[in-house]
């Protein structure tokens, strides 16, 4: 219960005198606070009607298959780094059909430790740890493919359980593990529903997809080509 002073505090007043003139105020909601159970970390509240939440199948490297609702950070596309042209490309999860994961490098690296604190000498501990790097091939509903690297969360809800996965650019396993012990996302297949097809068709009409070479040519070059047609 909260107290609100109705008279100004004057010198010499006792605590009992102050409280006798205080007005009792109830907190909002009759004093009962109910936390919002629908809030999800990273802005990933699972809206059953949102096209950001897709139905799909996620396959892991150990053969485990997760079939259910799939989403990433809501209202945030996958930001893919294209090393060949040194640019990022954003890919909306509502336009994705499949994601194929390719292992670029996989090796076991030695664990080196300093001989003692403050020393520049390192000694091999006799143990190794696995290190892998990945590339991701995105195929959209339009049949376009984009391959690059990224780090992004991927959530999969099967029944009442949600698995928090990560699409890593590179990952290291634990000390003493071998390469086969590292579990990672191997593929993602998302269901193409009529609502998704309708969204993709509307997006294409509003903003036609332009090849990146045309973008690099600049608006002046594009206007010149249009005038000559």
Image: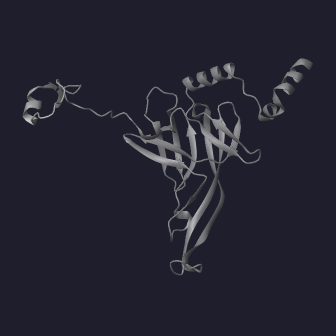
Quarter of the rendering containing residue 217: top right
Q: Is residue 177 left or right of residue 135?
A: left
The C terminus appears in which quarter of the rendering?
Answer: top right
Q: Quadrant of residue 6?
A: top left
Using the image, determine if residue 144 lies above or below residue 25.
below
Q: Is residue 163 left or right of residue 170?
A: left
Q: Position of residue 57 (x, y in %)?
A: 52, 41
Q: Is residue 128 above or below residue 63?
A: below
How far from the left and from the top, in percent, is residue 83? 73, 48
Picture coordinates of residue 51 (x, y %)? 52, 28
Q: Position of residue 181 (x, y in %)?
A: 52, 63
Instruction: From this view, report whether residue 212 is shown above or below residue 128.
Output: above
User: Looking at the image, can residue 229 be seen?
Assistant: no
Farthest residue, direction front: 11
92 left or right, relative to 183:
right
Residue 199 in sight? yes
> What residue sits 43% from the left and 33% below the top?
46
Residue in the foreground of this view, choosing between 226 and 67: 226
Image quarter hosting the N terminus:
top left
Residue 114 vs residue 36, the one in the foreground: 114
Looking at the picture, tell me which residue is in the foreground, 120 or 161. Answer: 120
Total numbered labels: 0
In this figure, which colouring scheme has been used for the structure? one colour
Tell me which residue sits at (56%, 23%) in the image.
194
> Which residue lies at the image location 71% right of the left edge and 35% below the top edge?
144
């Amino acid at each position: 219960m909260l107290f609100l002073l109705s008279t100004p505090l004057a010198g010499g007043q006792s605590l009992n005198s102050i409280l006798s003139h205080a007005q009792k105020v109830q907190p909002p909601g009759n004093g009962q606070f109910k936390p919002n159970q629908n809030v999800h970390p990273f802005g990933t509240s699972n809206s059953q009607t949102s096209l950001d939440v897709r139905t799909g199948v996620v396959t892991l490297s150990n053969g485990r298959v997760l079939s259910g609702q799939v989403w990433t950070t809501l209202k945030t596309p996958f930001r893919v780094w294209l090393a060949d042209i040194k640019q990022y490309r954003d890919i909306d999860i509502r336009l994705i059909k499949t994601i194929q994961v390719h292992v670029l490098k996989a090796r076991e690296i030695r664990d080196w430790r300093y001989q003692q604190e403050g020393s520049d000498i390192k000694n091999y501990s006799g143990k190794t740890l696995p290190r892998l790097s990945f590339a991701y091939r995105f195929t959209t509903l339009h049949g376009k493919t984009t391959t690059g690297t990224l780090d992004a969360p991927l959530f999969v809800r099967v029944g009442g359980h949600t698995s928090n996965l990560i699409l890593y650019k590179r990952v290291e396993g634990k000390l003493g593990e071998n390469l086969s012990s590292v579990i990672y996302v191997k593929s993602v297949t998302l269901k193409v529903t009529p609502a998704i097809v309708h969204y993709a068709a509307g997006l294409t009409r509003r903003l036609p997809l332009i090849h990146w070479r045309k973008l690099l040519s600049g608006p002046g070059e594009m206007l010149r080509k249009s005038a000559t047609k």
